Image: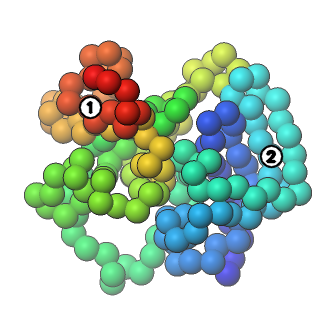
């Protein structure tokens, strides 16, 4: 077991804390447990940026929308060859763009639905509003709670034309987006 920095995103705040890693990788731990114990936690409000500090915070996985991946990547010999598909997700106040890794030829949306609740994306961009200011953060890896996604859309067609540029469209113009809100289309 080792401690690592935990940077998480909930519906109304960012969370900066320490977490004791009890699994091989952070994404494995996030999928295996439904509740987490964080230490030296600071919650930063998205509404106005005010901060609350707590010596200990217990948080349910369903409250986490995303977590910045940190810690070990896992055993190299157990990795499989994958292809990357660019995906966009809406997670409450956050918009995420990143690369989903899946076996060659697999349907990206079907693959998303068959994964555990916490799904890693690489070369990710996380955008949100904090204190009235738009923030966009580029990250090597981000673990998102696919069960909390409002919508998910692969961006393979657009990404083929602009392979190194993040593609973001206004929500109203998204084609073939999977809507997870249950609202009538």
Residue that carries the numbered disc 2 in the rendered image: 42
Q: Nearer the viewer, mark 1 or mark 2?
A: 1
Q: Answer yes or no: is residue 140 visible.
A: no
Q: Nearer the viewer, residue 30 or 157?
A: 30
Residue that carries the numbered disc 1 in the rendered image: 177
Whichever of callouts 1 and 2 sits on the residue coming sooner in the sequence is: 2
**Label 2 secondary element:** strand
Q: Position of residue 36 (x, y in %)?
A: 68, 63
In the displayed structure image, the side of residue 12 where residue 161 appears, left or right: left
Q: Position of residue 29 (x, y in %)?
A: 55, 70
The Cα–Cα distance between marks 1 and 2, rounded to whole angstroms, is 34 Å
Query: Which quadrant does the C terminus fall into?
Result: top left
Q: Position of residue 158 (x, y in %)?
A: 19, 30
Which residue is at 37% across, 37% downward? 180
Residue 81 higher or lower than 69, as above or below = below
Which residue is at 73% across, 49% downward? 16
Query: According to the image, what is the colour scheme of the structure?
Result: rainbow
Residue farthest along the left direction in this orientation? 105
């Amino acid at each position: 077991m080792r401690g690592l920095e935990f940077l998480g995103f909930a519906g109304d705040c960012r969370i900066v804390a320490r977490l004791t890693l009890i699994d091989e990788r952070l994404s494995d731990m996030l999928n295996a447990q439904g509740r987490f114990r964080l230490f030296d936690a600071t919650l930063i409000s998205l509404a106005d940026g005010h901060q609350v500090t707590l010596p200990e915070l217990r948080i349910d996985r369903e409250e986490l929308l995303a977590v910045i991946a940190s810690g070990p990547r896992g055993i190299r010999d157990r990795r499989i060859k994958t292809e990357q598909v660019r995906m966009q997700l809406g997670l409450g106040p956050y918009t995420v763009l990143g690369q989903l890794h899946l076996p060659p030829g697999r349907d990206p949306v079907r693959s998303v639905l068959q994964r555990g609740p916490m799904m890693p994306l690489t070369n990710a961009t996380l955008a949100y509003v904090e204190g009235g200011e738009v923030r966009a953060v580029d990250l090597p890896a981000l673990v998102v709670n696919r069960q909390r996604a409002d919508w998910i859309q692969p961006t393979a067609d657009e990404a083929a034309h602009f392979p190194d540029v993040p593609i973001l469209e206004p929500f109203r113009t998204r084609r073939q987006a999977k809507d997870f809100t249950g609202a009538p289309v």
